[in-house]
Amino acid sequence: MSETSFDIIIIGGGPGGYVAAIRAAQLGFKTCVVEKKHLGGICLNWGCIPTKALLRSAEIYGYMKNAADYGLSAPNAGFDLQKIVERSRAVSGQLNAGVGHLLKKNKVTVIDGEGRLDGPGKVAVKPNKGTNTTLQGKHIIVATGARPRALPGLEADGKLVWSYFEALKPDIMPKSLLVVGSGAIGIEFASFFSTLGTKVTVVEVMDRIVPVEDAEISAMLQKQMKKHSLDIFTNTKVTRLDKKANEVVCTLEDAKGKTKTITVDRVISAVGVVGNIENIGLETTKIKTDRGCIKTGPFCQTDEAGVYAIGDVAGPPMLAHKAEHEGVICVEKIAGLKVHPLDTLKIPGCTYCHPQVASVGLTEEKAIQAGHKVRIGRFPFIGNGKAIALGEPDGLVKTIFDEKTGELLGAHLIGAEVTELVQGFVIAMGLETTEEDLMHTVFPHPTISETMHESVLDAYGRVIHM
Amino acid sequence: MPTPILMPALSPTMTEGKLSKWLVSEGDSVESGDAIAEIETDKATMEVEAVEEGRIGKIVVSEGTDGVAVNAVIAILLEDDEDDSALDSVETSAPSAPSEAATETAPDPVAVTPRSVSAPEPKGTRIFASPLAKRLAVEAGVDLSTITGSGPHGRIVKNDVEAAEKTPVSQTATAVTATPSPAQETAAATPPQLQGLPGYQTLPNSTMRKVVAKRLTESKQTVPHFYLTIDCEIDNLLALRKDLNNRSTEGEGAYKLSVNDFIIRASAIALGKVPAANAMWTDDAILQFDEADISVAVAIEGGLITPIIKNAGAKGLIEISNTMKDLASRARSGKLTPEEFQGGTFSISNLGMFGIKDFSAIVNPPQGCILAVGAGEQRPVVKDGALSVATVMTVTLSVDHRVVDGAVGAEFLAAFKPLIEDPVTMLL
């Protein structure tokens, strides 16, 4: 290794780390990324991207099964799980290589190995090949990400109990599956396996599935998933897993203490993720942590001068796009540019189950808790021509406005392609538009996006197609 | 494709400017953001930036050229790989007048961004604020022009308005002294300076009100006024008027002369004798008119308007009188055509019917003079050492000193007074 001194060293090459590196290189910093496994991180290799590839296969299979609805015939519709997984891995592989090219093009030094803080301004590197070394960095950005939370008794064993790593390359097609946790990860896997024919049971300890979403959206998703033959138990926890040779007997307990058992081929543990704060040398610095994540200021600075933290390791929301944005903010602040702190309220969230869920801003409940007097608009997909033409009549766009100011406080969507729609509301919130501006915006016809317009109109009693 | 670079408008009202200096030469490569020329108006010198990259193929307007119309082609930009032959395809004759056609016909004009050099545009011509911030400002009575925005490029966002709202003391103080701005107009539902005042009605400004406000403010602020006052005895005029009116027949050809008709005619004749007072200021020259077109202020609902007696010196009293009656009645019903009230070389404003003794009017730009006429009233006068009574009317001439000096104004009044006091001389 020739160079050991850099302007900016980034520990971790996930979506936060590699984006920060490219931005740093654009700003003229001599930049280095230390990544122990895969460029692109969990998101690109074991998260967002490969699951989207799997879900796309499931979606097309779902269409094939319903071909007759569209006047088509696909009598022998079937699938090859191995090939589905291969495609998913190939997608990740392609993008992983792409990140490598981008870093090279921007003249970012990439070191394959494990980096850890080693006192102020220093990063100790244990390379995957070769001898240990120490790098000097004027600025060090910790972007070590997160890993699946392991609840006692629910730890993934790689065989009968899967985390998302195993669930992404299943060795068998389980006939029955218990998904523990109904956040984005759990619900996406539930949707994938269910569409391919697995009998899926979802257990959620909270009173509703996708609990971070608006209650109305949760209820609608639950109804839709039950319609597709999923069993969903809310207010329920898993108290015991009895692992047999090739199946698991699961004991579920509801809020009243009533128990029941179900037997499934496999269990997916999707009870959240925790920040990777161990073994990265935090003890050699003044960095403080809070609930498993590094404490940071508005521009990602830690309690140690010259050390920053971005992405999952810096706390929720643990989303790739949040990490990317923090990476940019962090580096631009180092460069002395005028930077605006990240407003976490305006970070959208997307879940790619069927039907899709997407949202930004406050839920109705949180808006009221925050003291807003709200105006709510709702528009169902059944009133939208494009949705009907697509054969996707199940969906809803809910908008929440502050009654006094007309500020768009939140938008909550469920239905086909809503993950691609939500960005319209994100821009609207970012630019602080009011209902008036949204009403004056022309939405193209025929598109599902018209449901967004109608929802805003509905909040003010002006809905047209309902 | 060669792209014309156009003369930019440095302010909304600019129609032409001086291309004072080229900062690039033909053949130079420019990048977006490079300063390429300096432009001068009466107010400021600004740099013009290139918005697209390319090579300066041809400089059309040479430096030092005055009066270059906005949107005139000042240079041609070639793409890097184009050679000069491409220039042949471009129409390079520079329009001499500000023409919208230039914008329409020029192929893909390169927008140029003026960059302030010596005199920045006054802050507050346009305030960038989010729609939500604007609405919150209205509700909170916060003047956006007093807030510094924290958003991208200084855009005012919700937080800024809320922060301003929390510091009401300084905000109110600045709001009171702040100059009005467009945003303030829209944000004026409960302006802080009106807090503590009794309830009020909001009377939206009509277009006429706005024009009156703009023109008179401009006049009082930019025209150096001075005032000359003189008393005229009008007993002879009143007697003559009575005599002439008694001669009026019924039916067709009837007339009823007013004192004002005499004043219009006397003014026109006096202006004929002192043409230097029948003049108007422009930046390049004083325009001295051959005829006197007299604008007469007429009060109408919601404002005033000044219909014109054209070439009043060539019109007799009856014609002046009848024309004036027709114009005033149509002015009150809003039926004047623009050419009947736009223009004029001299104005008369008469408040005598309200008993006003004397007053000073504001010059009606671009005219040079306005005559303010008070009431005719009986006053003690001293003649040859003896006290007597006469009907006296005081007139005050307001003058734009750039056009008319004191002596010229006095000369005009000296010509006007005998015509009024001995109105038979108006026949001469």
Image (cartoon, grey):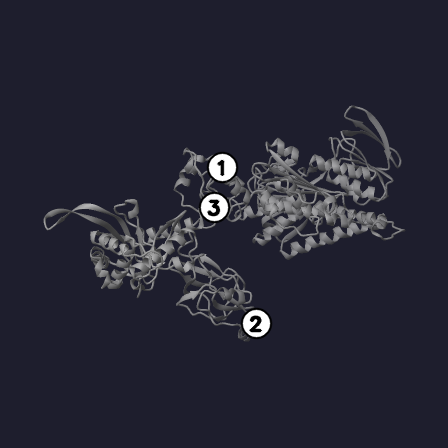
Q: Amino acid at mark 2?
A: Glu
Q: Amino acid at mark 1?
A: Ala
The residue identified by callout 3 is: B183
Are both tags, 1 and 2, on one chain? yes
Chain letter of disc 2 in the image? B
**Is the residue marked by circle 3 packed among few (<14), some (14-19), or many (20+) residues within 10 Å?**
many
**Is the residue marked by circle 2 packed among few (<14), some (14-19), or many (20+) residues within 10 Å?**
some
Query: Which of the two marks, 2 or 3, is nearer to us in this view?
Result: 3
Q: Is residue B19 left or right of residue B241?
A: right
Mark 1 vs 2: CB contact within 8 A? no
- The label number, if any, that marks residue B82 in the structure image: 2
Disc 2 element: loop
**Place of residue B8 in the rendered image (x, y in percent of width and height, measured from the top left):** 47, 61
Tell me which label, 1 or 2, sits earlier in the chain. Answer: 2
Are both tags, 3 and 1, on one chain? yes
Classify residue A184 by image quadrant: top right
Disc 3 element: helix
The residue identified by callout 1 is: B140
Disc 1 element: helix
**Place of residue B185 in the rendered image (x, y in percent of width and height, measured from the top left):** 46, 45
**Place of residue A369 in the rendered image (x, y in percent of width and height, measured from the top left):** 62, 31
Chain letter of disc 1 in the image? B
Classify residue B315 by image quadrant: bottom left
Front-lying residue, A10 or A391: A391
